[in-house]
Image (cartoon, rainbow, N blue to C red):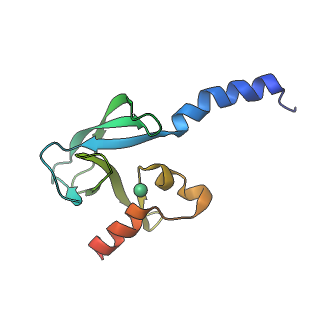
């Protein structure tokens, strides 16, 4: 069944804002461009969904990593706010929490952070 205009509008209304939410971590004591973290017992940290258009902090979530899983943080244009990158063994590449990184599956374009982290880790 074809969607009516009304349904289309409703759908866009509830999906578009989320599309611009990027997950970031605030590291107040870090000035490095790239840093990483891992813990033999598993790492837990707080990340924040940011509206990339307005800079508004939308909500915080708790992230729990498996033991010895390493997560990488790359500086954004905002001091002490970092994008989150993690290597996916399944995809054999890094995933990034920035807007371009989230769109990789559609665009097949690596974001600047993926290129950056591949140089650091290689
Ligand atoms: Zn990125």
Q: Quadrant of ligand 1?
A: bottom left
Assign the N terminus to one quadrant of the image. Answer: top right
Query: At which x and y percent is residue 3?
Result: 83, 30
Please give left or right for residue 43 compared with residue 115 in the image.
left
From what the image shows, is residue 23 above or below residue 102?
above
* Residue 88 visible in the shown view: no
From what the image shows, is residue 54 above or below residue 29?
above
- Identify which residue is drawn at 67% across, 31% down: 12
The number of numbered badges drawn on the structure is 0
Query: At which x and y percent is residue 66?
Result: 27, 50
Please give left or right for residue 11 compared with residue 97 in the image.
right
Query: At which x and y percent is residue 90?
Result: 46, 63
Relative to the observer, which residue lies in front, 65 or 24?
Answer: 24
Tell me the quarter of the picture where residue 27 sits. top left
| Residue furthest out toward the left | 29
From what the image shows, is residue 71 above or below residue 29?
below
- Identify which residue is drawn at 60% across, 32% down: 15
Please give left or right for residue 45 compared with residue 104 in the image.
left
Please give left or right for residue 13 compared with residue 20 in the image.
right
* Residue 109 visible in the shown view: yes
Relative to the observer, which residue lies in front, 64 or 7?
Answer: 7
- Identify which residue is drawn at 47% across, 38% down: 53
| Residue furthest out toward the bottom | 122
Assign the C terminus to one quadrant of the image. Answer: bottom left
């Amino acid at each position: 069944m074809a969607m009516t205009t009304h349904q289309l509008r409703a759908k866009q209304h509830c999906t578009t804002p989320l599309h611009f939410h990027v997950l970031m971590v605030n590291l107040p004591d870090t000035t490095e461009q790239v840093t990483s973290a891992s813990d033999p017992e598993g790492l837990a940290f707080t990340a924040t969904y940011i509206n990339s258009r307005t800079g508004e902090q939308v909500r915080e979530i708790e992230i729990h990593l498996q033991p010895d899983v390493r997560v990488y943080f790359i500086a954004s244009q905002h001091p002490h706010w970092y994008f989150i990158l993690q290597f996916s063994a399944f995809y054999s590449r890094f995933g990034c929490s920035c807007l371009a990184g989230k769109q990789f599956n559609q665009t097949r374009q690596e974001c600047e952070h993926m290129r950056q982290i591949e140089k650091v880790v290689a």
